[in-house]
Image (spheres, rainbow, N blue to C red):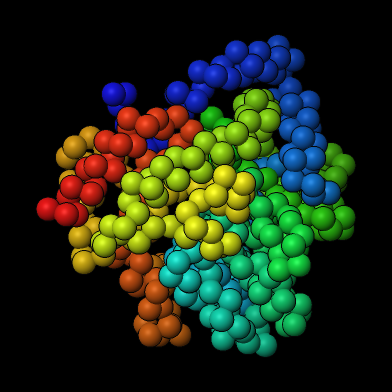
Amino acid sequence: MRKIQMVDLVGQYQEIKEQVKSSMDNVLNNAAFINGPEVHAFQKELEDYLSVKHVIPCANGTDALQICMMGLGLQPGDEVITADFTFAATVEVIALLQLTPVLVDVEPDTFNIDPKAIEKAITPKTKAIVPVHLFGQCANMDAIMELAQKHNLFVIEDNAQGIGATHTFEDGTKKKSGTIGHVASTSFFPSKNLGCYGDGGAIFTNDDDLAHTIRGMVNHGMYKRYHHDVIGVNSRLDSLQAAVLRAKLPKLDVYNAKRRAAARKYNEAFKGQANIVLPKTVNDCEGICDCCDCHVFHQYTLRILKEKRDKLVQHLNENGVPCGVYYPIPLHSQKAYLDERYNEADFKVTNQLVKEVISLPMHTELDDEQIDFITKLVIDFLND
């Protein structure tokens, strides 16, 4: 059996290495390292894939989220509601801009932000909602967009883990994650479903004026060289990373289908296990159906009951199986984001999830032998 890895980028590279090498050689030969032809071509190709009017590439996903907020003109003291159960980058940029983060609980089955908790947290100072499409599926965007319209709020989608997922609205219409709110950010960190070989990110919007503002912001506030019309930052996707992303983008749907297939095999093996809560899709499918594209499984995350999670992590690691705990500490309990406004009673789900969640290896190169080995280890340990 091949060595089991949390993410197997080396194996994935083998299929696309000739195209990547050729594209990188072109960049090296023309020396257009910043805003070169590869960047512009990737931007257009991603716009076509997402059916969104504007893609603005930038240096990384955290920058992308910060620039979204800058572009919307949010001001110090404005409140921004987001999920307590997510990576710190989401709340980090809110705090960096001297906005006021308002953390709320998530749903126990999808792990995504709870619209009821959002509504409860809205005040006259609230200006934006940041739903995080956690682990690869969209938050409840029907309810979130309804709340935003009712209270005149911006919606900034944190799509760092969800690229390629599709949200099906209650009326049957479909949109790709990151194209639903006013603006969205994504990350091309190497381990993402669409990842480059370094740092990279992008911003999506259908708003022409907002796109124009953001295009200047990512480049020191310039639209014309040495003319600084807005306050900006230095955040640009370099051409070598764009070359990698161009090679991967046409395969994204295939990559995501492979992840769903692996998740389905995991689910089949774990079905009926009393101490395991399986991941649930937003459409409440029985299992993970062949045609469903609502979840792209950036992570395959289980809940382990009866306080056995930590010992299971140790057992897997001792047997050569990597795993992750995303996330072990709620954001409202992190030293940097402590706030007397928060009440532990408002974070019942998050406080439980951090004790139970475990993410198993998930990538495009997982094979049946590896999945069988992993699932047997988990089942035997929990039933011992």
* Residue at x-position 64% and y-position 16%: 19
The percent position of residue 203, horizontal first and vertical second, equals 70, 50
Say if 268 sits above or below 199 in the image: below
What is the count of numbered marks?
A: 0
Where, by quadrant of the figure, is residue 122 drawn?
bottom right
Tell me, yes or no, if residue 92 can be seen here.
no
The image shows residue 311, relative to residue 243, as above or below, that is: below
User: On the rendered structure, is 338 left or right of 209?
Assistant: left
Residue 63 position in % (x across, y down): 61, 50
* Relative image position of residue 124 (x, y in whole percent): 67, 88
Identify which residue is drawn at 24% across, 42% down: 376
> With 105 as the anchor, is 356 left or right in this view?
left
* 275 lies above or below 321: below
Residue 352 seen in the figure: yes
The residue at 37%/32% (across/down) is 368
Q: Position of residue 9 (x, y in %)?
A: 46, 29
Drawn side of residue 173 relative to residue 359, left or right: right
Q: Is residue 207 left or right of residue 292?
A: right
**14 or 189: nearer the viewer:** 14
| Image quarter hosting the N terminus | top left
Question: At x 66% / y 33%, what residue is drawn?
Answer: 249
| Residue nearest the observer in this picture, 196 or 356 | 356
Q: Nearer the viewer, residue 43 or 28?
A: 43
